[in-house]
Amino acid sequence: LFSGRVDFLLSAPQLKFLPEPTVPEIAFCGRSNVGKSSLLNALTGRKSIARASVTPGRTQELNYFEIGMADPNVPDGKSLFRLVDMPGYGFAKAPVKVVERWKKLVRTYLRGRQVLARNLVLVDSRHGLKEVDREMMKMLDEAAVGYRIVLTKTDKIKASELERVANRIADESRKHPAAFPTLHLTSSEKGMGIEALRAAVVEDA
Ligand code: GDP
């Protein structure tokens, strides 16, 4: 599925630096430390294509990765779609100014990006939905961007606990018009749920 080219394309600190909107995009967002880099690496099968978070609040860019053709007869085929690593949110000590800048960047991107096919909202399975996640879901609803909720680090909690958290989030997400009804349960560390999520992403794109 993703067996073709995977390339880092660019890092856009402002919307004017976004690539030409010629290819479908799947964007990934979540609280800082949710496991976004690890998930991107697991999905693309690259060890460190997405660098793990450095200083919280410092990475305010949209990072683009291109997923290319898997067809061996098309050696350098055009990219099929792009994965967009959105800046993490919800770090406790971020100054108001930084948060405001983040919101403006994200809101404008969500509303104006016609090639945006789907968003993935990552949620740490140990923590469940936090206020910032709800805010993000509201922004997605308002921009009418369909999204999937992806639970991360499921290897870190007991199956019974995971079920409880997943049910609670599923109930809540049903109240959101743009949310998909099914959750994705993943562990980048153990490789759980990765293949299914990869298939969903390809389908969405
Ligand atoms: P990001 O800030 O959202 O990009 O998060 P990272 O991918 O850098 O992950 C944050 C921390 O969680 C790191 O210490 C990872 O090793 C850890 N982590 C990420 N995914 C998993 C997972 O599936 N299982 C476990 N046990 N740890 C994970």
Image (cartoon, helix red, strand yellow):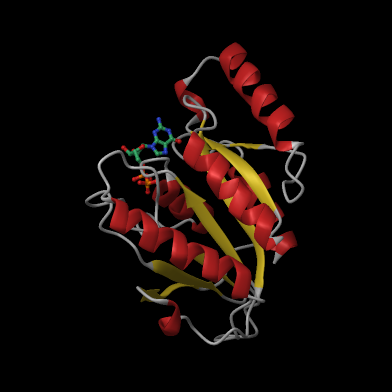
Query: On the rendering, which quadrant does ligand 1 occupy?
Result: top left
The x, y position of residue 23, in whole percent, is 63, 80
Left or right: where 39 falls relative to 57 = right
The x, y position of residue 115, in whole percent, is 65, 76
Q: Residue at x 62, y 48 (%)?
A: 138
Q: Residue furthest left?
A: 55
Please determine whether, in this image, residue 165 is positioned above or below residue 68: above
The image quadrant where one finds the C terminus is bottom right
The x, y position of residue 143, in whole percent, is 66, 62
Q: Residue at x 61, y 12 (%)?
A: 160
Q: Nearer the viewer, residue 16 or 23?
A: 16
Q: How many marks?
A: 0
Q: Residue at x 52, y 56 (%)?
A: 28
Q: Nearer the viewer, residue 39 or 70?
A: 39
The x, y position of residue 193, in whole percent, is 61, 39
Please determine whether, in this image, residue 6 is positioned above or below residue 59: below
Q: Residue at x 35, y 73 (%)?
A: 13
The image quadrant where one finds the N terminus is bottom right
Q: Which of the 4 image quarters holds residue 20? A: bottom right
Left or right: where 160 falls relative to 103 = right
Left or right: where 186 falls relative to 90 = right
